[in-house]
Image (cartoon, rainbow, N blue to C red):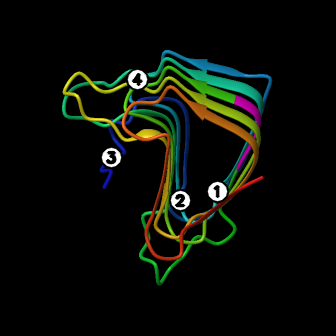
Amino acid sequence: ATHLDANRTVAGLVVTDPEGAPAVGVTRGLIAQSHEYGVFVSGPGPQVFLTDTSVVETQAVDAPARAGGILFVNAAAAAAPSAGALLNLERTIVRDNADSGVAISGAGIEAIFADVSILDTRALASGAATGGLTVQGGVDLDGTRVLVAGNVRAGISVEGVGTKAAFG
């Protein structure tokens, strides 16, 4: 389980709104050398679109903190799934991040990946690592032309009841 302190999270792009559902789009962007997370998204129904974007070289702030390229989380209980939460990655590269490449967790989150590469995720200094792509807790992921390679621990991890991942 990931625990974040909203008062201390350091990231290249942060999208949080416990009451609403913000929609954020980044096109032709570079999110590099962030601390903790390159992209951090939390809330009941945010929609995030990354197109022609790279999220690279994210570092952990301090041990035992977790870190990663992209974290999208709905911390609400399974009985209160996200309403319309969406992570859409198109022509996106997630490379050389500490701990995790892309981690998506929470009931009702839809993830759509097209032409996405998740590469070379490395372990934290402690040796802990999540891996390249983790989906859990009721996420529904549909991926087309997704490359996951060179990641520590696991390339793709799908965990939990109701979690779905399809690649074509």
- How far is the residue under mark 1 from the one under mark 2? 6 Å
- How far is the residue under mark 3 from the one under mark 1? 17 Å
- How far is the residue under mark 4 from the one under mark 3? 13 Å
Q: Which residue is mark 3?
A: 4
Number of the label disc, if any, that sits on residue 35:
4
Q: In this orientation, which residue lies closer to the viewer: 85 or 43? A: 85
Dots 1 and 2: beta carbons under 8 Å? yes
Compared with 82, 147 (above or below) is above
Magenta segment includes 99: no
Q: Nearer the viewer, mark 4 or mark 2?
A: 4
Q: Which residue is mark 2?
A: 43
Image coords of residue 109 (percent x, y): 61, 64
- What kind of element bears circle 4? loop
Q: Residues within 10 Å of mark 4 (few under 14, many from 20)?
A: many
Amino acid at circle 1: Pro
Judge from the rendering whether residue 114 lies leftward or rightward of residue 140; answer left or right: right
- What kind of element bears circle 3? loop
Amino acid at circle 4: His
Q: Residues within 10 Å of mark 1 (few under 14, many from 20)?
A: many
Dots 3 and 1: beta carbons under 8 Å? no
Q: In this orientation, which residue lies closer to the viewer: 120 or 99? A: 120
